[in-house]
Image (cartoon, rainbow, N blue to C red):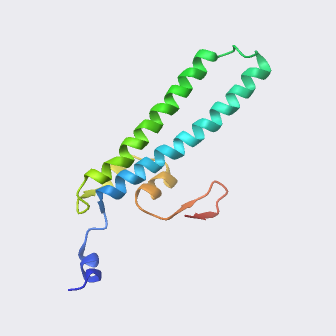
Amino acid sequence: MSSAAHLGDRDPDLQPLCDVLLAVAGELERIRSLGFRLEFAVCALALRVEGPAAGAQELQQLDLLLQQIGALREFLGALPQAIDPKAHVQISAALERIGLADMKSRLAGCDWVVAPSGSFEVF
């Protein structure tokens, strides 16, 4: 029997564990990138409003948060090298807990999301 026939028999909810881990690592990188943009904007506002010392401790906490997200991304991104490529995991129950449609689509393995403008982005 061909591999295409096997794919038709396979549960579509069953995803390769390596792919799922890499997808989560990718989501962490998206969050981290947004955090860097936020950090830059907050720093610019703080300098304009209060001067260099304003909110320095809070900005250090934001920087620590972004470092932690980056470390988790690296950890999850390295795990697939230690996992049997044949390992699969069911993801539907976990996906149901995610309320963000674009993130849910990416984690489900879709290669498109609806952009905030309503148009489609293809990856």
Query: Taking 119 as reference, is 4 above or below it?
Result: below
Query: On the rendered structure, is 23 left or right of 3?
Result: right
Query: Taking 28 as reference, is 55 above or below it?
Result: above
Query: On the rendered structure, is 29 left or right of 9?
Result: right
Q: Residue at x 78, y 19 (%)?
A: 49
Q: How many marks?
A: 0
Where residue 28 appears, x then y in whole percent? 47, 43
Q: Residue furthest bottom?
A: 1
Q: Residue at x 76, y 16 (%)?
A: 51
Q: Quadrant of the C terminus?
A: bottom right
Q: Residue furthest right?
A: 48
Is 77 or 117 nearer to us in this picture?
Answer: 77
Where residue 93 appears, x then y in whole percent? 30, 51
Where residue 97 appears, x then y in whole percent? 38, 46
Query: Taking 72 as reference, is 61 above or below it?
Result: above
Q: Residue furthest left?
A: 1
Is 118 or 108 nearer to us in this picture?
Answer: 108
Q: Residue at x 46, y 50 (%)?
A: 26
Q: Quadrant of residue 34?
A: top right
Query: On the rendered structure, is 122 left or right of 18?
Result: right
Q: Quadrant of residue 36?
A: top right
Q: Quadrant of residue 1?
A: bottom left
Where residue 25 appears, x then y in whole percent? 42, 47
Q: Residue at x 64, y 34 (%)?
A: 38
